[in-house]
Image (tube, helix red, strand yellow):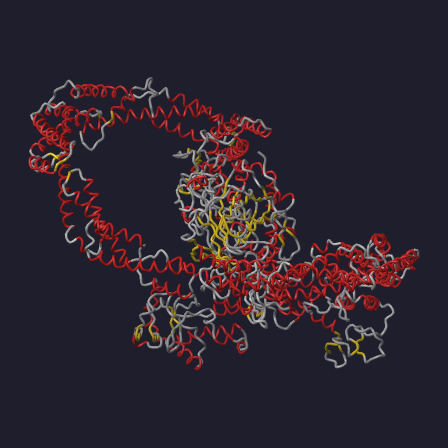
Amino acid sequence: MGKGRPRAVEKGVLGQSSSVSSSGSSSIPPGPVYYPSEDDFKDPLEYIYRIRPEAEPYGICRIVPPKSWKPPFGLDLNSFTFPTKTQAIHQLQARPAACDSKTFDLEYTRFLENHRGKKLKKRVVFEGGELDFCKLFNAVKRFGGYDKVVKEKKWGEVVRFVRSERNTGECAKHVLCQLYREHLYDYEKYYNRLNHDIVRGCKRGMHGEKKGEHGVAFLSSKRRRRDSDGEKVKICKVEKEEEEFDQICEQCGSGLHGELMLLCDRCNKGWHIYCLAPPLKGIPPGNWYCLECLNSDKDSFGFVPGKHFSLEAFRRVADRAKKKRFGPVPPSRMQLEKMFWEIVEGLVGEVDVMYGSDLDTSVYGSGFPRVNDKKPESIEAEIWDKYCASPWNLNNLPKLQGSMLRAVHHNIAGVMVPWLYVGMLFSSFCWHFEDHCFYSMNYLHWGEPKCWYSVPGSEACAFEKVMRNCLPDLFDAQPDLLFQLVTMLNPSVLQENGVPVYSVLQEPGNFVITFPRSYHGGFNFGLNCAEAVNFAPADWLPHGGFGAELYQLYRKASVLSHEELLCAVAKAKDCDSKALTYLSKELNRIYAKEKKCREGLWRNGIIKSSPMSPKKSPEFVGTEEDPTCIICQQYLFLSAVVCCCRPSAFVCLEHWKHLCECKLSKHRLLYRHTLAELKQLVLLTDKYNSDETPQCSDLQRQLSCSDDLSALTKKCVKKVRGGHVSLAKLAEGWLFRSSKIFQIPYSGEAYSNALKETEQFLWAGSEMDAVRAMAKNLIAAQNWAEGIKDCLCKIESWSCNQSHDLEKVDVERVNNLLNLNPPPCIEPGHLKLKGYAEHAMILVQEIDSALSTSSKSSIPELEQLYSRACEVPIHVKEVEKLQARISALKVWVDNVRKCIHEKCRAAIEVDVLYKLKSEMLELQVQLPEAEMLLDLLRQVETCQARCSEILNSPINLKNVELLLQELDSITVNIPKLKLLRQYHGAAVSWISHFNDVCVNIHEREDQENVVDELTCILKQGLSMRIQVDELPLVEVELKKAYCRKEALQARRTKMTLFSIQQLMEEAAVLQIEGEQLFIDVSGVLASAMHWEERAAHILASKAQMSDFEDAIRTSEDIHVILPSLEDVKDAISMAKSWLKNSKPFLGSSFPATEGFRPMLKIEALKELVSQSNLLKISMAEQPMIHSVLKNCLEWEHDACSLLEDVDCLFNMNNTGNALINSLIPKIECVVSMIESVLETGLSLGFDFDEIPKLQNACSALQWCNKALSFCTVVTALPGVESLMENVGHLPITCASSALCSSLIDGVKWLKRASEVIPVSCNHKRCKLSDAEEVLSEVQRLKVSFPLMVDQLLKAFEKHKLWKEETHIFFGLKTEERTWSKLLKLKELGKNDAFSCRELDMILSESEKVEKWKHHCLDILGYPVGDVNSLLGALLKIKHTLDRSLYIYNKSRGCNPRDLCIHCFCDIKDHELLSCSICKDWYHLQCPGAILGHQSDAKAHVCSYCQFIESGSISRSGGALRFGRKCPELGMLIEILSDSEGLCVGIEERDLVQQLVGLAITCKDHLVELTDFALAYLDRDISITSEKLTTALKAVEIAGVYDNHGNSRLDLALARNSWRVRVNKLLENSQKPLIQHIQRFLKEGLAITIPPKDYFWQKLTELKGIGLQWAENAKKVSMDSGALGLDKVCELITQGENLPVHFEKELRLLRARSLLYCICRKPYDHRAMIACDQCDEWYHFDCINLSSAPKIYICPACKPQTGELTVLSMNKERSSEGKYGEPQTPSPPHTESRRKNREAKRKPKTKPSLKQMMPETMDDSNNTLRYSGGMDFLLWRNRKPFRRAAKRRAEVESLSRFFHREQQ
């Protein structure tokens, strides 16, 4: 058995054409295709195993089954319905990340505030709408960042992401680029720098670090979280004892390990860093947001559930979509793929399709036959059963022999149960690999093909890297994006990045296999149906382990437990031999991992352990679900760790540290197998592996090493107080102590403590077998002793109470305990229990004696024995037997008495009597009721005998009636008697029914029902057991009913004449012909006989058409099927058919002047003539047909004679030059004759065989005539090619003739000769030898072409002359070879030269020069086609460099001249102005030369000095003045080196060399100036300004750009701008704000201002002074009056005298200095109310006010009342803290009082600090009315005291409001 041939791998055939990307730049190679034979196809797993080494490097393969494989489709297409999903194909790749704009805005705002010192301005408008910064940022990130987008000019793609519904214009691209550069470029740099930083500390600042239990550094306080206003709120540390956590992990639900908790900076939800997917190693830098905040539900992408469709409805949708996209013409594969990837990349528009994917076949049905499914009627049972059991049936594949999934016994959809897929055009399955890295098999049942793409599993990492690089924004939003199956990427992109990709085109009936970890995806070409399932052969096992680790890394719940599957497969008896090697290796890996983790737990102090509860079916996987790790979500099959604080929470051994913060003594290890059992499982698989491969040997060596390590568990050592101790040492000590326990009396506590100590040993390897054996003995002894004690306790308790509620001890349990010899331990109660057991055994013997067969005990004696047994404290089974015997006796007696006294007929069943008799024999009863029972049975047997006698012989009705009367009173239900009663009733009923039917039977119209009734009666009578006399009468009446039924049918429908005659004969026999029904039938029979006689006459006499039609009309009135009617109709039909066929051949049928008429067949005409003799009707058209046939035969004779003449002409062999002139007129004459005959033949309208022959001969003769004309004239190549193309259209018979063969050879030679002659327009140039060969072929031609021979000879001469000139050119020196000479030789060579080495040299050298010039133009920014402008461009650049050097030299005082800096013209040409700063000259007409002037009207300032002095942040300009872009210096050096290989001397090369020298000199000057400016740190700015002005002028003028030098200049300008702006800030008359100082410091950090810089040190000093005062001010403003007023005023004075202005802090302090209420305290957020007369504010609690009235007057304003005046209480203000609070009082001015009263009448609001300030303080100008801040504060605080002095007499009325302070 060999594997099938992979044809596609070898030749790339069978539809596996290369896939083309949307850009058409690269092709996708095909994957392998296999064609297994019938033998290969028997076992799919074996076949896949053989092809795997060849196919796996592709990741995919296609298998074409043998032709015999044709499984039926198992679903009913008419009733099949299924759900669908909507796929947005245009968003599979080109979609924005589902990012939450609010989260982005929050992060962006924080960046602006913290790193740029500014806030987000109002919204930015782009194309009439608000620009979404989040989308824009992610779009630019998708394409590699700002710099890459600018370089690769991808702003069009970015615009489509931001505004997908609009067309992209050049203006929009430019605007979006500028907006991004202005707003987001700095944020992009910050974002990239943040992502590359490695931060090991915690996320927030730490006040101090501590060490936790596990040695992990954590924060002494929680992270700071933000409230709704963005302010940071400090959360206090919660005491550990309270067990309340301020943050719970969203993944594991635990609030422990707070030091590793990561909080989202938006929603404040928390995650442990080890619970994230994938987990983080440390706290990330900067702000962090969870995936819920990063992703927007609004923009989230996925496949939306769609409608339910029937298959027919879905087909209509699919067809409509395909026609809309491609029209009626079916597209090719290349068109489909190109269109699909254009849609995916967002180049076409929105495209939504429906896909019925992932349909569970256990719910919706499978396309393959299944045993439990209903078989369609159209499919044979044998075929159905064959494919039900086929191994290639996907329902059987996962459970085949050799599959690792045989042990899985629960239906996992997609894995164990196939999934069904119903697709349409472009419905897609995105890039993914299978769950657990399984294999997958996909079968296409029917429909359009399916296109697959695959990346091999070995390249999975490279694939993932490319995906992350190409779609960074999607992966940032969803790190597990590849698990979502919603993303595609063009395979050509993967190829461009070095990732191999292969494609497969799956046709209907093909299988597609994907290999483990192979990423694959694809789409459908149209409507189709496929089915897929996973499978796992032996070689999958290592990949399954990798898949399990991947699930653990990404915290994904796995489909099944990989460890459980390994153990189940290893324990299976039918394990495949191929799997043993893989299984042993994988088990060894699991064993080593488990051993390492368990020993680690022991070392860390987790010594408690216990085995997991055993599974009911350990040989099967998934029957019982294991717990999962709360961290990584993986199944815990082998082991787990649990803590008593959370019994329902489990973790794996790798995450035990994250379970909780309890002491390790509370943790417990749970294990399913000990290490010894696991090792034994590994050795077991190795034992069955008979093939000693090198891998097996390595595995054995590895296991032997493991054995050594396990045997010497002494290496498993941990620290204790006294030093170190090993596990083996502890085990030895325990064994010694345990052996002493058996020697002392039993103590439950001692045994429990000993067994508890074994928990730290039992999980280990075989070295702990002795411990396990001892533990087993201890458990057995403990159970025995506890059993003895339990039995004695129960016996004594029952003996004392004798309560029926207490349970007795079972005697079997007691015997089992006592039979154990020797006893396992010393238990004193052993002998006492033995005494109780002996007493119980004596009672057992008495009961057995009473129940024996020889015993004749009565019921009272048995009851007495039973009462004695109930008093014994030990339960024996014999007591139950005794009780059952007593109960059975009582029941039997009652049943017998009921039967004897029964009076109803047939109430007692016979079986009941026999049962009572059998019970009597079993119970050995000797009672009087026994004899009575036997008498009744004898009566029953007598009755049964008489009934049997009657039933065994023919039954007479009268005999039965007599017997039934005699036995009517019997009470027993005898079956045979009951049967006789049934027979009798059936006979009586049958006779009655027959008599009812016979009443008026002949008058009924429904004789059909009569027949049915009589038939039924007859059947019933024959089937009865009792004989009746009426049975023969039934048969007679049935025959009459049949006859009447036939007569009624003849009256209603037509019948044949013979049937009616037969019917009348039967009626006469039955003597019913006199009935009216049969009289009517006889009249119809007479009419039919008369018509038959007339029909026979007209058929024999060949009458006219009218006679036949009259006979047809007469037959319609006769209600009989007439035998001759069909003959008459056939004669008419035959005549009409002949007449219809004859009309085309008659002349009157075809108008001569009308258009086209169909060609007639001469054979059809002859057939019509022969048919006319067979007609039975006379016709007038018969002679006309004979005349037409005669004309046709005459034309055929003339045409044949002309064809003979043509043959003679074609067979001419001699075509010399002499005969050519006479042959041409002869051919023309024959052509005219042929045309005349053709015209005549066509006019007849017949399809003669001679017509195409004449037409072929005519066209061939015309071609020959044209070919002969070329012998005398010179013809161009197009004419010859046209004639040669017509050769293919010549008839074969003509082309093979002598004349045509000679002319064809001549034309072929003429074509070759025309092609070899050199012409400039020829794309293909021939060699000279080819032309000479063509010339030599003239001799063997039968037709000569003298003019073409002369042309060839002249071409040879021209080529020779050109070649000589070329040799002369290359003989010159390089400097003598000019560009013009080379161009001239090139043009001559194109026109005159044949293909030769010299021509190639000329073309090559000229191409080199042109490419070099084009390269130069491209660098200079000129159009590539404008080569002549290169020299002028280079001269202009040289001129700019000369000007730049002049500026550098002038700054050094070298030969200054009075020239304009802009245009470099002489001073005398135009009017000039001099800059007052740099003293340079400028023309007035030069644009932008002079920007403005200073205070002096004649002192002008140039734009360069204005830029430097103003401290602008960015500079404009940089382009050359003549409109071209500046070339880079490195590019000029590169093109200079490229020019070394040119063979001719050109002027431009010398000029480029000069430019490079000048540019390098300018660069040296620029570096010198910038280095000085960057190193300068003093206060005087003018020194660096002069240097930078010179450098800026020189760089702006220079026509060559140097990247390094300009970068240094930009940095120097930025630092200079910073110094200028800081200097203006410090020297300004107004104080700087602290925000300005912080912004400048952050800006200085960005441009790396040195710490020793004068201005940096000045700003740092101001910041320190200001922040120190601001911190004190903030504390004082929030101290609720703790600090004295004088201290507050002093602090305000300090703030006013600071060199930095703090507006907010001073406002808060001034508000803090205002005092209110009778308590004289500042505002402290308590509820307050204002007096409506004096505007003074009071606290609610100070004046004992519980709710706010509408009008309030304080006691100071109305003292005579002695109490508060309250008008109209407002019940809505009911609780403190929710009152509407009044505004802050203002100074006592009339206008202010009026405003306050108006405000108080409105709903009162809670006052803020700003509201509590006086109105005059809101305006900074009003504060100037006071001499100082202190004067204002003293005046404001003086107001209450002044009022109190005025009304001192009434103050006593307020005394009751001071009770709180007095207390």
Q: On screen, 21 above or below 1767?
A: above
The image quadrant where one finds the N terminus is top right
Residue 738 % position (x, y): 41, 23
Residue 1557 sits in quarter: bottom right
Residue 935 sits in quarter: top left
Residue at 76% of width from left, 60% of height from top? 1264
Q: In this view, does 135 lie to the left or right of 1112?
A: right
Q: Closer to the camera, 1128 or 1675?
A: 1128
Q: In this view, does 1514 lie to the left or right of 663?
A: right
How many numbered discs sit on the rendered protein?
Answer: 0
Residue 327 % position (x, y): 55, 62
Q: Closer to the camera, 171 or 1226?
A: 1226
Residue 898 % position (x, y): 9, 33
Q: Closer to the camera, 851 or 1109?
A: 1109
Q: Closer to the camera, 1218 or 408?
A: 1218
User: Which residue in the rendered view is the most extreme toward the front?
Assistant: 1101
Q: On screen, 215 above or below 764?
A: below
- Residue 267 shows in the view: no
The image quadrant where one finds the C terminus is bottom left
Residue 957 % position (x, y): 12, 38
- Residue 407 shows in the view: yes
